Image (spheres, rainbow, N blue to C red):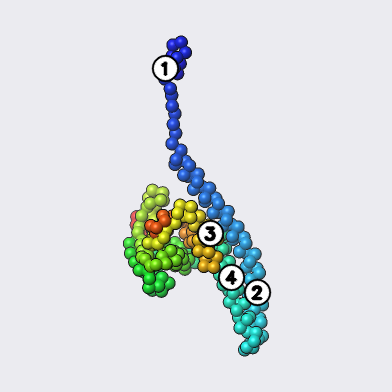
Amino acid sequence: ALGTLGTVSGVLVVAEDVTERQRMLEQFHQAERLNAMSRMAGAVAHDFNNLLTVILGCSDVLLRRLGEDQDLAPDVAAIHRAGTRAAALTNQLVRIGGNQQPVQPELVVVDEVVVSMQPMLSSALGSGVRLEIVPGAGATAVLVDRSELERSVLNLAINARDAMPGGGTLAISTSRAARGRPTGTETVELAVEDTGMGMDEETAAHCFEPFFTTKGRARGTGLGLAAVHATVIQAGGEVRVESSPGAGSRFTLTLPVAPAERRAAE
């Protein structure tokens, strides 16, 4: 402001904190990028499925015709096995692309799922990793495809195992909460936490993208976490990751409590 004879008598400073706005903009761009990559993955998967249908169909016909032919049957069987594995991968891509809804969404008690998976998880983790399961959501149910939820937990467990080559602890816990959802909306949180090598901020920001992997192409396809993300999002939930180098990783799957559960609670 100008005072008498044009001298400056004061200065008006207006400051605005844009940190939150910038954070939300970055999250939006990340979600848009992930969505675009997922759609592309789903489209590519449909084309590959058409090719695999021919490969698997022809190999089936050849196997029936060859019978016990010791020279050619093993090679054709190998072609069929490779085609079957490829079909499983393309099915993951279709799921990631959002072009296929869960086959059998049902009321699933999350605590029952994680407890029933203990033998399978122990076997997948091996003797070097200590498994801790702490169910805390009780009889609360969510609406999700049970097999896809089990596959998601297994994917996270295997990733955790690979992040702990020298051994460590994998903790799987559940709880009932309302964090991250609209007020009054109950959720179940399923957390998978390891004591492994962890990820830096850049890696964590890309970990749910299809084909993104730190394991190298010989050991990973980069589809596991993308499939986990697709499963949870299609069930109306959300996934978040907390990690830092040397401090392990924590993946939290947040799923809305099934409508029937909410009515019962009221």
Q: Nearer the viewer, residue 10 or 229?
A: 10
Residue at the disc numbered 3: 212
Q: Amino acid at mark 4?
A: Ala
Tell me the residue at 62%/64% (across/down). Answer: 46
Task: Characterize the local packing of mark 1: few (<14), some (14-19) or many (20 or more) Cα atoms within 10 angstroms.
Answer: few
Judge left or right: residue 44 versus residue 252. right
Mark closest to the chain's N terminus, 2 or 1: 1
Q: Amino acid at mark 3?
A: Phe
Q: Could you say whether the residue bearing mark 1 is in a helix, strand or loop?
A: loop
Q: What's the distance in space between the residues labelled 2 and 1, CA to CA?
A: 83 Å
Find residue 128 and report its horizontal and vertical position in percent: 38, 71
Q: In the rendered view, tell whether residue 216 sits above or below residue 57.
A: above
Residue at the disc numbered 1: 9
Q: What's the distance in space between the residues labelled 3 and 2, CA to CA?
A: 27 Å
Q: Could you say whether the residue bearing mark 3 is in a helix, strand or loop?
A: loop
Q: What's the distance in space between the residues labelled 4 and 3, CA to CA?
A: 18 Å
Residue at the disc numbered 2: 55
Q: Are marks 4 and 3 in contact (CB under 8 Å)?
A: no
Q: Nearer the viewer, residue 263 or 161?
A: 161
Q: Mark 3 or mark 2: which is in front?
A: 3
Q: Are marks 4 and 1 in contact (CB under 8 Å)?
A: no
